[in-house]
Image (cartoon, grey):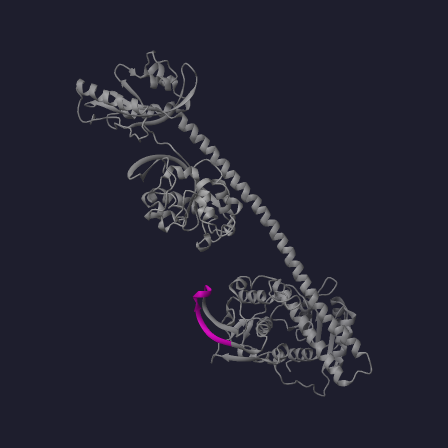
Amino acid sequence: MLYAVPAALYPGPSAEDKNCPMSAPRSSTSAAVPSASPAPAFLQGGGEVGALMRAHDWRSSSLGQPSLWPAPLQTALGVILNTGHPMYVWWGRELLCFYNDAYRQSIGPERHPGSLGRPGREVREAIWDIIGPQIDQVMSGGGATWHENALLPITRNGRREELQWTYSCSPIVDPASPTGVAGVLMVCAETTARGSDGAVNGIIVEGVDVTSRTLSDAERRDSEEQLRLATEAAEVGLWDVDVESDRLFWPPRVKAMFGISADRAVSMRDDFYPCLHPDDRDRVSEAFAAALDPRRRALYDVEYRTIGKEDGVIRWVAAKGRGVYEGDRCRRVIGTAIDITPRKAAEAELQILNERLEQRVSEILAEKQAAEAHMRQAQKLEALGQLTGGVAHDFNNLLMIIKGGLSLLRRPQVEAERRHKVLSSMEQAVDRGATLSRQLLAFARRQPLRAESVDLRLHIEGMRELLDRSLRGDVQVRTEFEPCLWPVEIDPAQLELVILNLCVNARDAMPNGGVITIEAKNRSAMPHAGATGEFVALSVADPGTGMSPEVLEHVFEPFYTTKEIGKGSGLGLPQVHGFAQQSGGSVRIESKVGEGTKVTLLLPRAQSAAVPVSAALLPQSAARGAESMGSVLLVEDDNEVAALVSEMLRELGYRITRAASAQAALGALANDREIDIVLSDVMMPGEKNGLDLAAEVTRRRPNLKVVLTTGYAGGAISSVDKDMQVHVLRKPYDIRTLELALRAVRGR
């Protein structure tokens, strides 16, 4: 990346360029190759390099169309293509190379356009041991780097040259990258010293080994003359210090570096040290003393500022030299000096430019981040609108079924068969509403999991009636369970919702009917899921329409749905994902368009035996006996709900005492009234809720059974003490579910 010579326009692809994305043969016009699509704004301008990038068909490259390139890359390329300063961009994991016209003019035909768009290690292999660690530091989040007068080799025009560069490596920030850095922006300037013919000049201080013997006068004169001629040609000033006499030899060129007239005599004491900048004086003195020390005999190599003795101008000087010794005594110090004021000015300007560019890039990325924040907020509002619209639509349909059905049932002329159909439709609407409510609560994580050991075979087989009601007649469910299937530690109610969601999705994916396969197998150590241990792999598969890769990327996102409005809330699969994670497992989806879909959940193995399957899932009837079922204290603040539940309890043979609050219920229990079961809502007005009531009832009457009913209890249910004789019944419920719950708490 750090090469510098003027170069002719690239005449055509060389053998090295044949693998370059932009090496298509071209005429004298760079844009002769037609572009696949109009170039985006950030590729406009940029001279020959910009034309090459616009002309190239990027669709087959790893980056794809420029309009789809990451915003930080677009910003960086827009900056470098529209500036006259040499700049370079390394992008992505491969460190793909991009540079501008100002840099192209410095690298020669050997490197252009063969470097454009290719991995950095390939195109800069010769110097990768130097620049590779610098780039790695920036890419790994280690911050920007700065390098002055770095010596880097280049093979150009058939010969190797040693060039000096000052450059910076700055991070191109991208929040999507693991380290927060997706590329490197390099701003550079060549600082190589050159002769009058343009050739690179090495700086030679001594022509012979002056440290091993004493020079004769003739040898010294010859050496000085050779050095004088070389330094004159390279605009380098020779200096010579007689240590013993403090005599200082400065030619006019060196005197000018200290703001001293050419005809004035000079000395170290009166001119050299007084003209040094105060901030550099100690450092220069230490370096000169090290060159005089016979034990160290160090190279005198410093850069310092001077303050002109006659004009007061501040200049920068780069000086090198060595001591000339007789035995252990240093007699002279001979060296060279170069006025590097223009170079330092260029470096300062470069640093300012780099800081401005970093600030500009940061500012651009900060409009961008603000825009993304606004966009995310807009997306949230859109998602909320989609959710509320879809849910409102679904609930209105359900309410329509119930309200319309009730109006029909009030008409005396409706015959029994039609009345039965209406009641069946109303029951299904209530079931759908309850399912949607559970989905919303599960997604909001307001409904805690009540994990217990569950036998999947018995539990899923017990859902047959529910699945038959929810699926069409042309859709069949087939189950395949491994023998000796392990029990799993999950919330059985949430499992029912998951199975129902997946089966309904499978039904919708098979418009012409088909077979849904529910399968369960024991599995140990699932490395693909990032989990270890013992699990049961529960899968639901269908041979339906399948999903595209684009859809698969979003299926677990809340409110995302490909169904029509009113056909789905977009909460089914997110609820499945949340259930799997909250249960300590995971979920994955395999799907291909036209070949179907398979959703697999990994559910953790339970360490204890499965509890008996809920009686509510058993198909057989639990008929009520002729004897009295006992007395129930009904605690419900809603008068209409209380009236309906009272009718259901009377139908089941229970005597009823009603209280509207927890305090009233405790008052009813205070006089030792005969009560067999307390049936209480969780959410009630007043200081105590249903949970508080259950705790107090258990304290006062340890043998008294409590059933809590809830439509939404937040995290409250999770705090129920397992030692309390409490059963939870979720609203809405029918008389059959109420009967089984009351029988269960009484052990019948």
Residue 88 location in percent, x, y? 43, 41
Q: Nearer the viewer, residue 692 or 191?
A: 191
Residue 486 shown in magenta: no
Residue 525 shown in magenta: yes
Specify the quadrant that holds the N terminus.
Answer: top left
The residue shown at (62%, 52%) is 377
Residue ranking furthest to the front: 27
Along the horizontal axis of the image, is 555 left or right of 322?
A: right
Q: Is residue 149 visible?
A: no
Residue ranking furthest to the right: 412
Residue 622 location in percent, x, y? 66, 85
The magenta stretch is 519-530
Q: Quadrant of residue 661?
A: bottom right
Q: Nearer the viewer, residue 659 or 589?
A: 589
Specify the quadrant that holds the C terminus.
Answer: bottom right
Along the horizontal axis of the image, is 257 left or right of 82?
A: left
Q: Tell me if residue 489 comes above or below residue 216 in the rendering.
A: below
Q: Nearer the viewer, residue 692 or 80?
A: 80
Residue 712 location in percent, x, y? 67, 66
Q: Tell me if residue 550 comes above or below residue 536 in the rendering.
A: above
